[in-house]
Amino acid sequence: MPDTSSHPTHTHTHTPTHTHTYRSLRALMRLASATLCPTTVEGAEHVPARGPVLLAGNHLSVCDSFFLMAALPRRLTVLGKQEYFHAPGLGGRFTRLMCTRLGIVPVDRGGAPAAAREVLARAAEVLAADASLVLYPEGTRSADGRLYRGRPGAAGLALTHGVPLVPFGITGTDRVQPIGTTGLRPHPVRIRFGRPLAYEEFQRRDRRSDGFPTTVTLRDLTLQLMRTVAELSGQEYVDDFAPPKSAAPGDSQNNSQNSFQNNSRSSSQNASPSASPRNER
């Protein structure tokens, strides 16, 4: 594992999870997983029971994270756009309360390098708290069911902090909650977790003068990650980034993670990475 003692200390703190709210949501999703959406989980033993871990996989629906929460005994942390914490009105206050209690980490989804550095810092805080962090390397949900090229955020965090990088593939959630819909529809779901990626060879490669992995290293590890995700999900892999989607209300994860993972490389070059909302495109 790399020496992280030289990493800068960040002023932000990891957003705590309200135990009762998280457990209540997980219980509801487990009920749905056993009835409305019969869910098969394979390879959960590959996810460490404790300590920091990155979970990286495909993204088909806004409900993906909720099914992951139901599938694993340990709490999961997800990045969410900061607009959810500043929405106006009664609905905005409820959304802010739920996001806070679920431990969702607010991030600036802007595309500037400074915003990407901020997200990398927030993600590092989650890992420093021995928590589990869910990432979707594609940066957005797949509108056609195919798996698109991954962005380097997950690889950069793994190589920088030396934490387990566990790939997963999820299927069926695009039928449970298609893009542009609310609520859950009856359909089976399958979640497959793979073994943590062995990236020691990438750790031994030369690094930049600031200690961060090179662009080639990030690209190669990300490609290995996405090929593994494709095997787990059974999706067709497209060696191109997912087509951009217009920002829309309810897009809680895609824009923030797209900014984070698309700009982690540029930011590192400037610094020494019902229970379901509306599934908008």
Image (tube, helix red, strand yellow):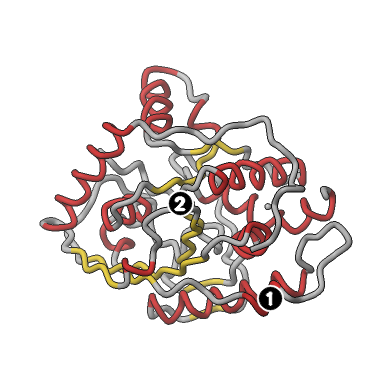
What residue is drawn where x is 78% and y is 60%? 212
Q: Secondary structure beneath disc 1?
A: helix
Q: Is residue 210 left or right of residue 178?
A: right
Residue 75 picture location, percent across and down: 36, 46
Q: Amino acid at mark 2?
A: Ser
Q: Residues within 10 Å of mark 2 (few under 14, many from 20)?
A: many
Vertical comparison of 135 with 218: above or below? above
Return the residue at label 2.
Answer: 132
Cβ atoms at labels 1 and 2 below 8 Å apart = no
Return the residue at label 1.
Answer: 202
In this view of the protein, which residue sits in the foreground, 166 or 149?
Answer: 166
The residue at the far top in this view is 89
**Quadrant of the image occupied by residue 216:** bottom right
Gap in angstroms between the C-alphas marked 1 and 2: 22 Å
In this view of the protein, which residue sits in the foreground, 131 or 154?
Answer: 131
Vertical comparison of 180 with 217: above or below? above
Q: Secondary structure beneath disc 2?
A: strand
What residue is drawn where x is 34% and y is 50%? 74
Q: Is residue 179 visible?
A: no
Q: Amino acid at mark 1?
A: Phe
In this view of the protein, which residue sits in the foreground, 3 or 146?
Answer: 3
The residue at the far right in this view is 209
